Image (cartoon, rainbow, N blue to C red):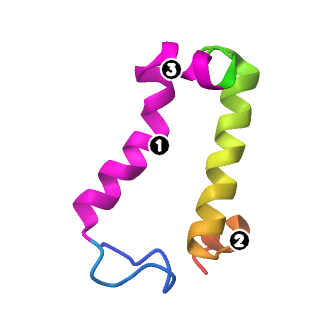
Amino acid sequence: MARRLSSALPADLDAGHLLLAIMGLVAYPLAFPQVTRMVTGRSAADPSFRAERAEFLRRFATALTGRRPEAAAAGG
């Protein structure tokens, strides 16, 4: 059931490395809270930081794939 994210990503991009990169983007601030605070001045446990991080990741995915979140959710 693997599906290409977008034609913006090369077809030969290794899926395992892509998954690892995505997991790192999501988990790093929580796994390394000291670095998160040093870089952002904020706690990774702060609900407003988490909301801003989630919005950043949505916008980053949109920029990377060239797809609008609504189109992705609809399967388009």
Mark 2, residues whose alpha carbon is within 10 Å: few (<14), some, or many (≥20)?
A: some
Residue 38 placement (x, y as % from top left): 59, 17
Give, as a three-letter code, the residue at label 3: Val
Residue that carries the numbered disc 1 in the rendered image: 25
Q: Which residues are magenta?
A: 14-39
Counting residues from the start of the chain, the first of labels 2 and 3 encountered is 3
Foreground pick, 60 / 73 = 60
Which corner quadrant of the image does residue 51 belong to? top right
Question: What residue is drawn where x is 76% and y is 23%?
Answer: 48
Of circles 2 and 3, the one toward us is 3
Is 59 displayed left or right of 37 in the figure?
right
Residue that carries the numbered disc 3 in the rendered image: 35
26 lies above or below 2: above
Is 15 displayed left or right of 55 in the figure?
left
3 lies above or below 27: below
Q: Main secondary structure of the magenta part?
A: helix
Question: What residue is drawn where x is 43% and y is 20%?
Answer: 32
Question: What residue is drawn where x is 61% and y is 81%?
Answer: 76
Give, as a three-letter code, the residue at label 1: Leu
- Mark sitting on residue 68: 2
Q: Is residue 59 magenta?
A: no
Inspect this view and state whether residue 73 appears. Answer: no
Residue 61 placement (x, y as % from top left): 59, 61
Is 10 displayed left or right of 60 in the figure?
left
- Asked if labels 3 and 1 touch by Cβ distance under 8 angstroms, the answer is no
Which corner quadrant of the image does residue 10 belong to? bottom left
Counting residues from the start of the chain, the first of labels 1 and 3 encountered is 1
